């Protein structure tokens, strides 16, 4: 685990390409710690002279007309197979005018047309949240591949993005666009209570994931699911002042850069320098 003094001594090169994959972004969802970072961090990095792309799920509660979403026909149209079933991938886009920033949305009628995000009206978790997370991760990476855009840093926010590190380092590891990409995850105080579907691991095996690499999902709890994401990440940011205690203990034992919680008014420069730490380890050949 690296200390913050090392992290703060590095400066990010202008023109770095950063892919933001966020569970929540305001104004499309209500303001929260995560949705505000999802909104403000990409803008701040863009204003520092970096190139950004931003993705989130197109939950059914997002008003397309009010937010002026429209489908990107040239990016839509492919099918993703999950658990032996085809699911059409639909890409939409909207602009946050004040930020001069576009947001891409991953959509699919089976997974994202419901009016609630992760739970039904009675507060029960959707039984297919595991498949929705797989679809979102693969949908983002397939879309970036179609854009032929090669990110230096992939920064994932929230548990719904936790499949991205695994897919990036396994299924997409030989793709020239992603071979040098480094992935950072931010952990928030937004854990789910009940385990994901008991067949989660089996569905990942259908994507040719090595069984020994995902054996932790024999018990697909929030803790194990997050540990898997940490294992496949190049760096971890503690995004909330309070996170799961077992995860905190796990972070203290790993041999990769970890950035402790930074308050909202101070995070931009520190996150930028943290990206430099991750990228410098690639240059130094230590990763």
Image (spheres, grey):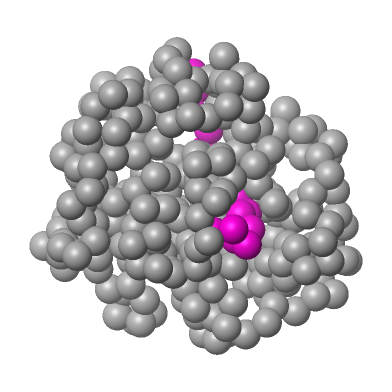
Residue 82 in picture, x, y percent from top left? 32, 30
Residue drawn at point x = 29 percent, y = 33 percent: 81
Part of the protein shown in magenta: 178-195
For residue 54, above or below residue 127: below
State yes or no: residue 184 in magenta. yes
Q: Residue at x 69, y 51 (%)?
A: 234
Decide whether the magenta segment is chiefly helix, strand or loop. Answer: loop
Instruction: Kindly tell me whether residue 246 is visible in this rendering.
Output: yes
| Residue 163 colored in magenta in the image | no
Asked if residue 82 lies left or right of residue 72, the reply is right
Q: Nearer the viewer, residue 72 or 49?
A: 72
Which percent across, then down, holds residue 99? 38, 79
On the question of residue 196 being in view, the answer is: no
Taking the image as shown, residue 17 lies to the left or right of residue 146, namely right
Foreground residue among 20 and 88: 88
In the image, farthest residue toward the left: 65
Q: Is residue 146 positioned above or below 215 on the image?
A: below
- Position of 133 relative to 256 (above/below): above
Q: Quadrant of residue 54?
A: bottom left
Give the camera-side residue of 57 and 176. Answer: 176
| Residue beneath the point at 56% across and 41% down | 170
Residue 23 is situated, as x and y percent measured from the top left of the image, at: 42, 48
Locate the C terminus and report the quarter of the image it occupies. Answer: bottom right
Point 52% across, 30% down: residue? 209
Q: Is residue 269 left or right of residue 221?
A: right
């Amino acid at each position: 685990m690296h200390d913050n003094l090392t992290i703060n001594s590095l400066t990010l090169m202008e023109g770095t390409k950063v892919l933001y994959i966020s569970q929540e972004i305001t104004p499309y969802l209500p303001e929260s710690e995560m949705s505000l970072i999802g909104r403000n961090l990409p803008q701040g990095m863009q204003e520092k002279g970096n190139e950004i792309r931003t993705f989130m799920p197109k939950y059914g509660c997002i008003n397309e007309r009010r937010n002026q979403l429209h489908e990107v026909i040239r990016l839509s149209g492919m099918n993703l197979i999950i658990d032996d079933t085809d699911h059409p991938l639909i890409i939409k886009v909207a602009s946050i005018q004040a930020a001069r920033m576009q947001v891409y949305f991953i959509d699919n009628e089976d997974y994202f047309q419901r009016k609630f995000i992760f739970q039904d009206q009675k507060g029960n978790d959707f039984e297919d949240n595991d498949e929705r997370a797989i679809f979102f991760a693969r949908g983002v990476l397939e879309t970036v591949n179609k854009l032929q855009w090669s990110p230096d840093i992939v920064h994932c926010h929230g548990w719904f993005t936790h499949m991205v590190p695994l897919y990036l380092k396994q299924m997409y590891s030989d793709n020239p666009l992603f071979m040098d990409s480094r992935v950072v995850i931010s952990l928030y105080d937004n854990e789910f209570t009940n385990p994901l579907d008991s067949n989660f691991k089996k569905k990942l095996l259908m994507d040719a994931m090595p069984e020994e690499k995902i054996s932790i999902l024999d018990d697909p709890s929030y803790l194990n699911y997050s540990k898997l994401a940490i294992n496949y990440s190049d760096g971890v940011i503690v995004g909330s002042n309070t996170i799961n205690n077992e995860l905190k203990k796990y972070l203290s034992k790993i041999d990769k850069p970890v950035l402790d919680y930074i308050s909202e008014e101070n995070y931009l420069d520190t996150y930028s320098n943290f990206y430099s730490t991750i990228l410098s380890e690639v240059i130094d050949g230590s990763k």
